[in-house]
Image (cartoon, grey):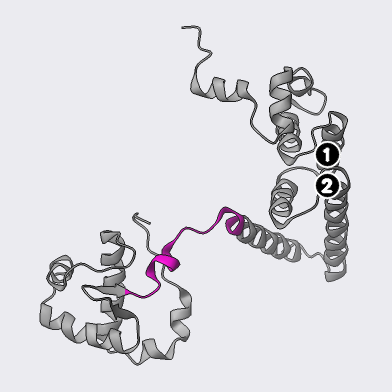
Amino acid sequence: MAGYWLKLYTEILDDPKYFRLSDNAKLGMIELMVVAKKANLDGRLPLMCDVSFFTRRSNEWWEIVYNELLEIKFLEFHGDCYVIRKFSERQKPVPATERSRQHRIVKQSCNEYATKRDGETEAETDTESEEKQKETAAIYSSYQNNITMLTSKSRDYINDAIDEYPHQWILDAINEAVKYNARNWAYVEKILKNWQTKGRGDNKPIDKMNDFDREMLRRGLRPASEVIEEMGLNDKD
């Protein structure tokens, strides 16, 4: 959880307990979160004298602020130290799947705004949205019928691919995976990346892959040749 960045949630603006605090306590709340982030102890605060040093304030100033923050349960006392409640939980990194979901929402909102700015009618926007939904549904169906059962995790993988590749590419890549009896998303994604790099007419790197690497992909693992190349173990020098 260590790092330079601190999350401050906008919901604080709607919390009546926050607005009942004195100006000093509001400022102290922010400064304590910065100190907790710097200390990197999952929300446990150092001694008050150390907090006073970090913030260049007196112990007397902090004693008053601590009391106010204890009353609203922002702070808790755990036997030998003060702890910011739920600090560790709320400062942990956002999962990759959630970042992808948020990115898609922002991207979709930007696209819709740009479309409306260009003078496109609501009916045209709805038609485009319906077409995209049909394309996405076709990919979900193909994955479920040819690869394996669709889960929330595999749905996220597919949605990420939809953002990056034409929908027909994804359908064709699934068919290629079936052709080589490699029914897993790792193989489908490998095909898509290869087409993106080499073009649709050149899928030799996959077709001519050695048997061991092909088997690794079928099991959803990275080809050994790729790992060796990344580690530089095939360097003749």
Q: Is residue 100 left or right of residue 29?
A: right
Q: Is residue 220 above or below residue 225?
A: below
User: Could you say which disc has been placed on residue 8 in the image?
Assistant: none
As rendered, which of 200 and 213 lies closer to the eye?
213
Q: Position of residue 22 (x, y in %)?
A: 27, 89
Magenta part of the chain = 84-99
| Label 2 crowd (10 A; few <14 / some 14-19 / many >=20) | many
As rendered, which of 13 and 182 lies closer to the eye?
182
Q: Is residue 33 left or right of residue 10?
A: left
Q: Are marks 2 and 1 in contact (CB under 8 Å)?
A: yes
| Label 1 crowd (10 A; few <14 / some 14-19 / many >=20) | many
Residue 213 visible? The answer is yes
Q: CA distance from mark 2 to mark 1?
A: 7 Å
Q: Position of residue 150 (x, y in %)?
A: 78, 53
Residue 197 visible? The answer is no
Q: Position of residue 195 (x, y in %)?
A: 75, 30
Residue for badge 1? 174
Q: Is residue 180 left or right of residue 72?
A: right
The residue drawn where x is 85% and y is 32% is 176
